[in-house]
Image (spheres, rainbow, N blue to C red):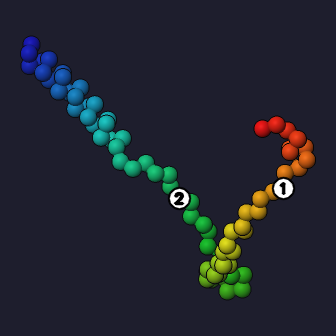
Amino acid sequence: MAGLMNELVNGVVKSVLNEILKKTGSRAATKRQKRQARSATTGRFKKATAKRAVRPAKKQVSRRRTSASRSKTR
């Protein structure tokens, strides 16, 4: 009887551990791949064009408060 209970418990523990170990690991989303553009004349893949230089961000300018917003009490 004790051997039967022991076998039953071992089976349950093994199956639970197996389920847990199956679900571990990285589950990062797959990245989409861009399609390579082909040249219309030759049919070969086009070379990647150079990206434009990124402009620096514009300086923030403080906006002047309107008369309506100045008349409101803070």
> What is the residue that sits farthest to the left in this orientation?
2
* Amino acid at pointer 2: Lys
> What is the residue that sits farthest to the top in this orientation?
1
User: Cα distance, mark 1 to mark 2?
Assistant: 45 Å
Q: Position of residue 8 (x, y in %)?
A: 18, 21
Residue pointed to by mark 2: 31
Left or right: residue 59 compared with residue 67: left
Instruction: Determine if residue 38 is in view.
Output: no
Total number of numbered labels? 2
Q: Position of residue 39 (x, y in %)?
A: 68, 82
User: Within 10 Å of the Cα at label 2, are there few (<14), some (14-19), or many (20+) other Cα atoms?
Assistant: few
Identify which residue, 74 or 9, lies in the foreground. Answer: 74
> What is the residue that sits farthest to the bottom in this orientation?
42
Mark 2 element type:
loop
Identify which residue, 45 or 72, lies in the foreground. Answer: 72
Residue 15: which quarter of the image?
top left
Left or right: residue 24 compared with residue 53: left
* Amino acid at pointer 1: Arg
Q: Is residue 42 above or below residue 64?
A: below
The numbered dot on residue 64 is 1
Q: Position of residue 26 (x, y in %)?
A: 39, 50
